[in-house]
Structure formats: structure tokens, C-alpha cells
Image (tube, rainbow, N blue to C red):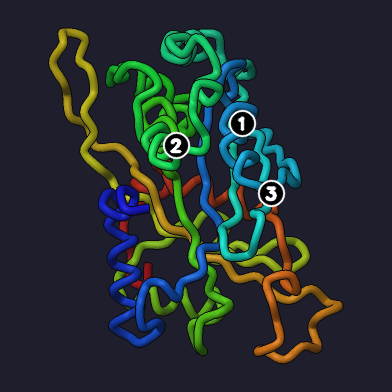
């Protein structure tokens, strides 16, 4: 989280705004709804590899989600206790991409010859943290990055960022009024000039109406690419972003008072329709969008 905060300016901007407006007294009061990682769906990597980290620490795999247009699969993982965030892992269905793009991807991922998690001491927290920030394959070239982005912006993001944290999520339902709804929190964010993803609407609502989410648009960051001669080339690419979630009580718990509602009483899991649009926080349709009044 410390490295993610340094690299994603909106994290600091949101947290500082929350303290300045007395939404919270300190950052420790924020509930992290979930964190998310993106992966390449190849035999030695993908969800089946990365999930081992979280299963080791007591997380339990729950629902599967499919995103056919984006060619992605995902699972979410429930934490061993409510003090920890949920985990959302997604992977690209590499074998469904065009042959040239598949070949480009595997030219990098084939450098990983065995499941790297099997080589980790999962009881060594520092080693796990270092693993999530280390390059798994060589630095891509700009040409390869652009070729992937033309067919799958998800693929381009992963080829450069590997397992870098894609986002963390602030739970808004536990905040004081009027910040305890996505609508109210979005208004607060827009007052502070935080740019929000408008794919499918700024507020993305599940079909049952009990999970409402929004997210910032990933800011462009300067990335160093291999230019093929041993030197590096700089290119601005989408970084990571911040998400916000409101989970309403399940109908059977709707009569509980605000002080009685626990995490177990609220809508759990995720919604394919919401997540599909949240993915686009790093896509050029969002990052390249001209800023407008009220955005």
C-alpha cells in the first residue's frame, strides 16, 4: 500500500481531502473493501498461481466471473476475518486473442518457466511483498506495448505492470452522512477535482441494487520501456486508480439500525456488470477523455 500510494496521486489526494473535511480523523479509520490484481492467463501464471498467496493466509475462493468481450475471468476471495479486505483476482484469456498478440505475450511470459509462487516462502511477508513488486519478465518495448493495447488494453497494462496493485477500495457506507453513499461521496470527490470513471455511468449499480461502485480514472504515469538497443524510452501510460464501494444491507437485515449493521449483514461479493466498467478505469476511453465541468 505504501508503494501504491506513492505512485497513485489520487490516493493521497482523496485521503487528505477526507481528513480536511472531517470525514475521518485519520487514515486508519478507512475500511478497505477490497484490493485487486490483474494477471496473464498462461499455464505457469494467472489466477491459479497468484491465488496461492491468499489461500495460504486463510482467504477462501468464492464466485467466478466472466467478461467475454474483454476476454477475462475473475474470482473473488473472502478474508479469514472482517478486518482484512476482500481480494479480486482477474486474468486475461490469452488463448482467445489473435495469434500475433498471443505470440507477443508469451514471448515475455515464457521467461517465467515455472510457477513463481511455488518458489516463495509464503510465511515471509517481506518476500511476498517484494514478489508483488518485482519484474517477472523483461521490460517490454513500446512497439509491443502498443500492439497489445490495440487489441487488449488489459494485456498492455499487465505486460508493463505485472502484479502491481491495480486498486484498493474505500468502503463508504461506514462513513458519516452525507459521505456514506456513493452519490454523496462522488459529489465530495468532484468538489475536490477528483476525476471519475463514467463508463456505464459514474455510479455503477448491481442488478439487485445492493452494490454501488465508482472509481477514479487512472492518471497517466511516465514509464520506462526498452527501445531494443539497451537504452530506455519514456512513454506516458495509465497507472492504477482508487475505487469506492457502497454495500447495502441484505433485505433480511434491512430493519437493523445503523449501529447494529455488521459487515456480514451487507451485500457481499461482486457484480459482473459493475466490474466490467470498473476495468475501464485504465482504458484510453477514460484516460483520454477531455475533462468537463462537474467531472
Q: Residue furthest left?
A: 231
Q: Is 282 positioned to the left or the right of 264 in the image? A: left
Q: Is residue 137 above or below residue 175?
A: above
Of the two numbered discs 1 and 3 in the rendering, the one whose residue sits closer to the viewer:
1
Is disc 2 surrounded by few (<14), some (14 to 19) or many (20+) residues within 10 Å? Answer: some
Is disc 3 surrounded by few (<14), some (14 to 19) or many (20+) residues within 10 Å? Answer: some
Toward the viewer: 43 or 184?
A: 43
Q: Is 287 positioned to the left or the right of 174 in the image? A: left
Give the x, y percent position of residue 77. 66, 48
The CA span between labels 1 and 2 is 16 Å
The CA span between labels 3 and 2 is 29 Å
In the rendered structure, are the residues bearing label 3 and label 2 in contact, judged by CB atoms less than 8 Å apart? no
Residue at (16% x, 21% y) in the render: 232
Is disc 1 surrounded by few (<14), some (14 to 19) or many (20+) residues within 10 Å? Answer: many
Which numbered circle lies on residue 47? 1
- Residue hosting label 3: 272
Amino acid at each position: 500500500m505504501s508503494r501504491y500510494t506513492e505512485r497513485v496521486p489520487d490516493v493521497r489526494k482523496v485521503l487528505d481531502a477526507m481528513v480536511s473535511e472531517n470525514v475521518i480523523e485519520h487514515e486508519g479509520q478507512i475500511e478497505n473493501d477490497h484490493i485487486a490484481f490483474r494477471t496473464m492467463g498462461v499455464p505457469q501464471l494467472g489466477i491459479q498461481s497468484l491465488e496461492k498467496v491468499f489461500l495460504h493466509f486463510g482467504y477462501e475462493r468464492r464466485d467466478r466471473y466472466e467478461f467475454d468481450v474483454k476476454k477475462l475471468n475473475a474470482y473473488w476471495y473472502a478474508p479469514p476475518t472482517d478486518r482484512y479486505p476482500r481480494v479480486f483476482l482477474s486474468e486475461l484469456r490469452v488463448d482467445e486473442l489473435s495469434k500475433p498478440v498471443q505470440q507477443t505475450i508469451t514471448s515475455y511470459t515464457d521467461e517465467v518457466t515455472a510457477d513463481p509462487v511455488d518458489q516463495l516462502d509464503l510465511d515471509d511477508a517481506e518476500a511476498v511483498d517484494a514478489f508483488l513488486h518485482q519484474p517477472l519478465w523483461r521490460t517490454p518495448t513500446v512497439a509491443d506495448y502498443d500492439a497489445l493495447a490495440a487489441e487488449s488494453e488489459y494485456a498492455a497494462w499487465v505486460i508493463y505492470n505485472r502484479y502491481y496493485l491495480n486498486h484498493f477500495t474505500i468502503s463508504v457506507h461506514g462513513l458519516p452522512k452525507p459521505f456514506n453513499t456513493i452519490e454523496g461521496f462522488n459529489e465530495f470527490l468532484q468538489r475536490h477535482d477528483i476525476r471519475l470513471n463514467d463508463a456505464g455511468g459514474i455510479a455503477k449499480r448491481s442488478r439487485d441494487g445492493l452494490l454501488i461502485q465508482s472509481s477514479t480514472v487512472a492518471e497517466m504515469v511516465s514509464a520506462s520501456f526498452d527501445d531494443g538497443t539497451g537504452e530506455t524510452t519514456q512513454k506516458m501510460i495509465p497507472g492504477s486508480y482508487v475505487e469506492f464501494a457502497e454495500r447495502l444491507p441484505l433485505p433480511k437485515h434491512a430493519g437493523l439500525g445503523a449501529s447494529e449493521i455488521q459487515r456480514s449483514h451487507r451485500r457481499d461479493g461482486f457484480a459482473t456488470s459493475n466490474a466490467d466498467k470498473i476495468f475501464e478505469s485504465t482504458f484510453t476511453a477514460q484516460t483520454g477523455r477531455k475533462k468537463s465541468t462537474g467531472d
